[in-house]
Amino acid sequence: MGGGVIGGHGGAASGASEATAAASAAAATGVRSGREALGRVNGTWCQEWELKEPAPEERRPPESSEVPIFEPFVLFASTSCHHFQVGDQNTQMADNSFSDGVPSDALEAAKNASHTEKLTDQVMQNPQVLAALQERLDSVSHTPSSYIETLPKAVRRRINALKQLQVRCAHIEAKFYEEVHDLERKYAALYQPLFDKRREFITGDVEPTDAESEWHSDNEEEDKLAGDMKNKVVIAEKEAATAEEPNPKGIPEFWFTIFRNVDMLSELVQEYDEPILKHLQDIKVKFSDPGQPMSFVLEFHFEPNDYFTNAVLTKTYKMKSEPDKADPFSFEGPEIVDCDGCVIDWKKGKNVTVKTIKKKQKHKGRGTVRTITKQVPNDSFFNFFSPLKASGDGESLDEDSEFTLASDFEIGHFFRERIVPRAVLYFTGEAIEDDDNFEEGEEGEEEELEGDEEGEEEDDADMNPKKEPSQPSECKQQ
């Protein structure tokens, strides 16, 4: 007698008694021992038995009071259909009844289960596969948040209390920056007389004294040797050269030169902007008054020119110095949240922020052609005074608008913190060299860190259509 399979789908207690009776009958005909191998393939549980022929002396009919000897097995059945095969007997139970026939898929499922287990064992014994699995497990990042989730509830409760303290610290920090703003306003009044004198020297309204113009450079020794060599030159030639040397008024094109020297500004300046910027005489920073919302104003003072009638163009930057209620831990000090420009009163045909284009149109019916003219926006530094408005009412800007607005804020901050306080150093280029050296130092440190952390990996808003910039306020007229 060969091997057999007892299998079924699901489980129902009503069919178990009949299955047990069938098993008892099978035992009476010689089933005495077996090897059980359970597996589940495509939702089918099966039990494989290895049957053997009993010894002749063991063949005897069971008595009525004797329970047939049969090794217990687990039967998994469903309420719809049960399939059994014991030795050479085939039974099928449907709706708690048996009939002839066993589906072949039960046998196939058992074979597939055995084949799958063997294949899995072979794969798991492959050292390359095990190494790949281990590498994948090692690469799984263990984030701090995942660690926090594993902590006991009592510990997480204390962490929440620490966050409450951190929020209170952020509000104290906001008050600190408000007082810093008050100090800036106070010291701006002390700086202003010096900045006013700077303007007088630049425009040539006042000539500096010898004491005011004396400056000891780092190359003073070299300058002294050069002076000794010059003394050997014929005095007549020296006097003639001095007489021919031009003596312009003030410092020509002072602010325009700064625009050319600073990459952040030169990128905004077009060729047709240059003649206008040569009329720029001063840039000032004005801070908001006490008790007013935090803000600052950039004032660009121009001498009379052929391009616009404004004497002063203004740009106001509004600031916020309080933690965001939705994300208080992101607070790092005052930030610019919006800005307003001004209207430039361009003289006729001098507006460089727009350009006139001609376009030919053909009439569909008559076939006649006409030429129309229209004005379209034009790239210019003076678009700086017609900024994009920050979003309001919960709306968000598209990606390009967000980038434009962020760049505008950065430029305004750079004027306030660097250009205006250190104008002469940006004119000579010394401040630019210092900035470059500082950036190179940062890059060097970053390279060292990258070298130390080689092999590590780093983990790296919904937008609405662009809003049109609102009409800016009127610029100052003097």
Image: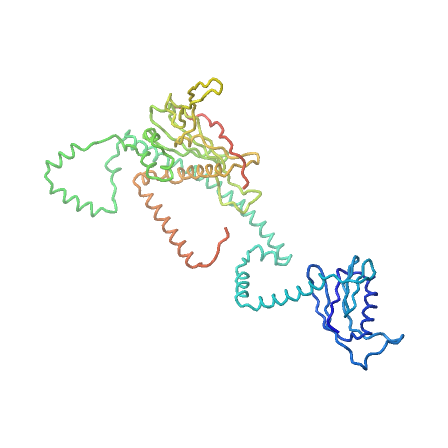
Q: Classify 366 as above or below 461.
A: above
Foreground pick, 425 / 169: 425
Residue farthest right in this picture:
64
Q: Position of residue 71 (x, y in %)?
A: 78, 73
Q: Give residue 475's quadrant in the image.
A: top left
In the image, is residue 281 above or below residue 217? above
Judged left or right of residue 179, residue 60 is right
Q: Residue 240: x and y, percent?
A: 13, 34
Q: Residue at x 18, y 33 (%)?
A: 245
**Which corner quadrant holds the N terminus?**
bottom right
Residue 440 lies, in percent from the top left, at 36, 50
Q: Toward which corner of the image does residue 130 lie, by quadrant?
A: bottom right
Placement of the C terminus among the 4 image quadrants: top left
Q: Is residue 63 left or right of residue 393?
A: right
| Residue sitting nearer the eye, 451 or 277 | 451
Left or right of 251 on screen, residue 153 = right
Exactly how many numbered labels are in the figure?
0
**Which one is in front, 197 or 18?**
18
Q: Residue at x 25, y 47 (%)?
A: 218
- Residue 96: give x, y in percent of width and height: 83, 60
Using the image as rendered, state which of residue 86 and residue 278 is in the foreground: 86
Q: How is the image coloured?
A: rainbow
